[in-house]
Image (spheres, helix red, strand yellow):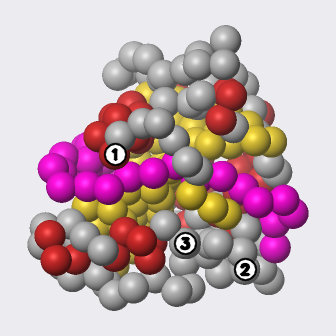
Amino acid sequence: MKDYQEIPSGEKEYSLYLIRKPLFLTSQILSALVNLSKGKIISLERLFKGQTSALVIFGPKKILEAHFSDILGLLELEDYTKVSEVISWEVGKKGQTDLNADIFGDLPVFSEQEQFWWQVIIRDFEVQMRAVFAFADKERKQLASVLEKVGEKNLSKLPKAFSSEQILDFYRKRVFTPADSFTSKSDEVLSFIGLLRK
């Protein structure tokens, strides 16, 4: 059972949305979403491209559209993960989380061709995290070593036997592996996606 993986199934049941009102994603809203989605996978994803950033959510379509569409300003999106040159890794938590730490405060400056994706998978407040750096210029590949230290006060890169391509596939499929997860609370999850609540 330690290698068991859960993959969200059914294209009609799950969908990907841009959160156009990320400041309305509060601890209370996230708790309500997780409680309504009992046993289902939700993925919060922070995307960086060049100088811009966006927050997207992947989850049960009926629940997101019926209860959270207006509050969060949801806009359905197509898959954004069609890239070739990537370095990807899984991320774990180090002990007690400092909720005021700015997880993305020390990000490098990205070119317009570079993308950094940060994924927080949630199932009933069990959490698993992954990161992907997509680069066009092989000279910039070394930025991955800087990105692996994102949130290093609270988080660290996990040593894994999987290749970057395998982890990218897990990212795309929003695979949840219970053995690699940890229990979290809504305010901690918000801090993991860069929504600070000071």
Mark nearest the camera among 1 and 2 is 1
Q: Give the percent coordinates (x, y) of residue 175.
A: 49, 30
- How packed mark 3 is, by other alpha carbons closer than 10 Å (few <14, some 14-19, many 20 or more), is some
Q: Three-letter amino acid code at disc 1? A: Ser
Q: Is residue 44 above or below residue 24?
A: above
At 21% from the left and 82% from the top, the residue drawn is 111
Q: Secondary structure at mark 3?
A: loop
Q: Three-letter amino acid code at disc 2? A: Ala
Which quadrant holds residue 157? Answer: bottom right
| Between 142 and 182, the one nearer to me in the picture | 142
Mark nearest the camera among 2 and 3 is 3
User: Which residue lies under the disc numbered 3?
Assistant: 149
Q: Where are the magenta residues, as a range?
A: 74-98
Placement of the N terminus among the 4 image quadrants = top right
User: Which residue lies under the disc numbered 1?
Assistant: 164
Q: Of the two numbered discs 2 and 3 on the same chain, state the one appearing first in sequence.
A: 2
Q: CA distance from mark 2 to mark 3?
A: 13 Å
Q: Give the percent coordinates (x, y) of residue 84.
A: 15, 50
At 41% from the left and 48% from the top, the residue drawn is 17
User: Which residue lies under the disc numbered 2?
Assistant: 101
Residue 54 in sight = yes
Q: Secondary structure at mark 2?
A: loop
Q: Is residue 12 above or below residue 191?
A: above
Q: Is residue 10 above or below residue 67?
A: above
Q: Of the two numbered discs 3 and 1 on the same chain, state the one appearing first in sequence.
A: 3
Evaluate if marks 2 and 3 touch, with contact meaning CB atoms under 8 Å apart.
no
Residue 24 in sight = no
Which quadrant holds residue 193? Answer: bottom right
- How packed mark 2 is, by other alpha carbons closer than 10 Å (few <14, some 14-19, many 20 or more), is some
Report if residue 81 lies within the magenta region: yes
Q: Give the percent coordinates (x, y) of residue 89.
A: 45, 51
